[in-house]
Amino acid sequence: MQQLLLGNTGIQVSALGLGCLNFGSRTDKETSYRLLDQYVDAGGSFLDTSNNYAFWNEGCSGGESELLLGQWLKDRGNREHIVLATKVGAQPTIPGGGFESMEGLSRKAIEQAIDGSLRRLGTDYVDLYYAHIDDVNTPMEETMEAFDRLVRAGKVRALGCSNHHTWRVEKARNISKSHHWTPYSCIQQRYTYLRPKPGADFGVQISANDELLNYCQTHDDFSLIAYSPLLNGSYTRSDTPLPKQYMSEDTQARLSVLAEVAQETGGTLNQIVLAWLLQSTPTTLSIIAASKPEQLQENLDSLNIRLTQEKLHRLHTAG
């Protein structure tokens, strides 16, 4: 599988990361293992989880995904071949709590969270540690210093952020650089081919916008990673309508061009979306998810599609 550099960290990651959100909860152990093995057999090595996955599923409180991955890593004995990413900042602090009771990004929260994640994952370090959701109530200096301490202690190799506005990313990176701390090297943001309508509200999630895309394009030491690139199957499943946030003026025009390019290349709509993200500027690494082997294979096969500059231009300018 194609490998990409993660910012300027020197860490190489697979062009498609595997999202492990429901592993160990809605996706049972046997199926989770099968999907993980299938992904690795295809040359993948970039696994994405979080300490709060998936507290919203029935009977879960968070940490189930990390526990499953820790068991799989131990059983397969392949930790050194895996680029492992997890997150902090969105774990409920009270039983049954939701995103209104997040742990935040204080020094204490970060230090406690990493030790819990390492214990569940059965490892002494993670390759990439994300600030999952921005915390405007904690001084940014406190957050970035705490993250840097983890890097210096060898518990974390690289840092990233998610669900942050661009100006907050730049501020955090400037603070880190001025103190000679480890800066954020990437951002994981909601991003797909369809564009949200103006003012679309995703709750705690933040969608990539033109400002962020321009930032990533002009900073070659900072990588863009997309979550929910396939909108939970909305591009292809008749039983999964498009989220209302994506019902904008140009939605139908972009869907039409997407379908044309899919027909011309022999790919599926999902595959064209993933190929477009990877081959556009800035290059975007997608976090894919699947609950069945055939879904995962469809996503993996997107790497076999090559879009010409003419097709990329048509897709980009549609609508």
Image: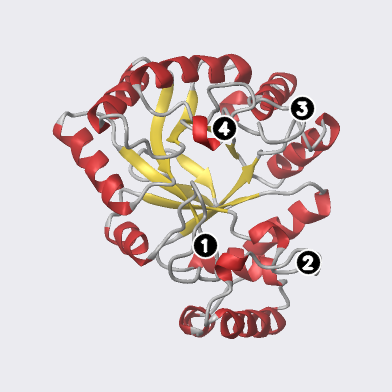
Residue 265, image quadrant: bottom right
88 in relation to 117, above or below: below
Q: Position of residue 244 (x, y in %)?
A: 61, 67
Residue at image position (47%, 82%) is: 313
Q: Residues within 10 Å of mark 2 (few under 14, many from 20)?
A: few
Q: Position of residue 61 (x, y in %)?
A: 67, 25
How much space separates mark 1 and mark 3, taking CA atoms? 36 Å
Residue at image position (53%, 36%) is: 99
Please tell me the numbered disc located at residue 237: 2
How much space separates mark 1 and mark 2, taking CA atoms? 23 Å
Instruction: Compare residues 71 and 96 and report the one nearer the observer.
Output: 96
Q: Earlier in the sequence, mark 4 or mark 3?
A: 4
Secondary element under disc 1, as helix, strand or loop, is helix
Q: According to the image, label 4 marks what residue? A: 50
Is the residue under label 2 in contact with that under label 1 (CB below 8 Å)?
Answer: no
Foreground mark, 1 or 3, reads 3
Q: According to the image, label 3 marks what residue? A: 59
How much space separates mark 3 and mark 2, taking CA atoms? 28 Å
At label 3, the amino acid type is: Gly
Q: Position of residue 15 (x, y in %)?
A: 55, 52
Instruction: Tell me if 106 is positioned left or right of 288 in this view.
Output: left
At label 2, the amino acid type is: Arg
Q: Earlier in the sequence, mark 1 or mark 4?
A: 4
Q: Position of residue 109 (x, y in %)?
A: 42, 20
